Amino acid sequence: MQIDKLKGQELDDLFDGILSLESKEDCYKFFDDICTSNELVSLKQRFQVAKLINEGMTYSKIQEKTGASSATVSRVKRCIDYGSGGYITVLSKME
């Protein structure tokens, strides 16, 4: 896991803070403060790509629908197939 290099109290504090959020409005406020617009665009695009991959959509349709590059689609697919399971965990909880 690539995140293992970053593990520590500071990252735990960030995750505890995120886990304390109780509403979408809380999320909007927090992520507005902590992320730049470009970071949020990247995060939401990657998550949409993951959702569409999970739904079985083709790479070309995903690129067309999300505006993501082929490299981004491939990277997200690689994370889904060989990563830590984070995308699948979240997507399955949303079903």
Image (cartoon, rainbow, N blue to C red):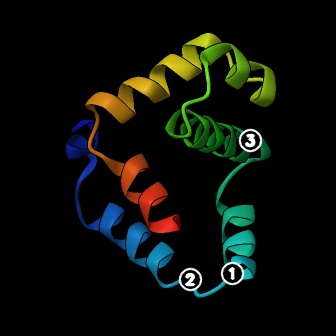
Residue visible at 43% across and 47% down?
A: 87
Answer with the quarter of the image where residue 12 lies: bottom left
Residue 21, image x and y in percent? Answer: 56, 82
At 71% from the left and 65% from the top, the residue drawn is 33
Pointer 2 local density, CA inside 10 Å: few below 14, some 14–19, many at least 20: some
| Residue type, mark 3 in image | Val
Mark pair 3, 1: CA separation: 18 Å
Mark 1 nearby-residue class (10 Å; few <14, some 14–19, many ≥20)? few
In this picture, residue 10 sits left or right of residue 91:
left
Tag 2 and tag 3, C-beta contact below 8 Å: no
Q: Earlier in the sequence, mark 3 or mark 1?
A: 1
Marks 2 and 1, Cα distance to the nearest angstrom? 6 Å
Pointer 3 and pointer 1: residues touching (CB < 8 Å)?
Answer: no
Given the image, on which type of amino acid does mark 2 rest? Answer: Leu
Q: Image quarter for residue 64?
A: top right
Q: Which amino acid does label 1 sit on?
A: Asp
Residue at image point 29% right, 35% down? 83
- Disc with the residue nearer the chain's start (2 vs 1): 2
The answer to whether mark 2 and mark 1 are in CB contact below 8 A is: yes
Q: Is mark 3 on a helix, strand or loop?
A: helix
Residue 74 versus residue 40 in the image, above or below: above
- Looking at this view, is 93 or 76 the one in front? 93
Q: Name the residue under label 1.
A: 26
Q: Give coordinates of residue 67: x percent, y percent.
A: 78, 24
Which comes sooner in the sequence, label 2 or label 3? 2
User: Judging from the image, what secondary structure is the residue with disc 1 in?
Assistant: helix
Q: Which residue lies furthest to the front in this view?
A: 56
- Give the CA distance from mark 2 to mark 3: 20 Å
Question: Compared with residue 17, is residue 55 higher up or lower down, i.e. above or below?
Answer: above
Q: In this view, does 20 lie above or below 62?
A: below
Which residue position holds label 3? 41
Is 2 on the left-hand or right-hand side of 46? left
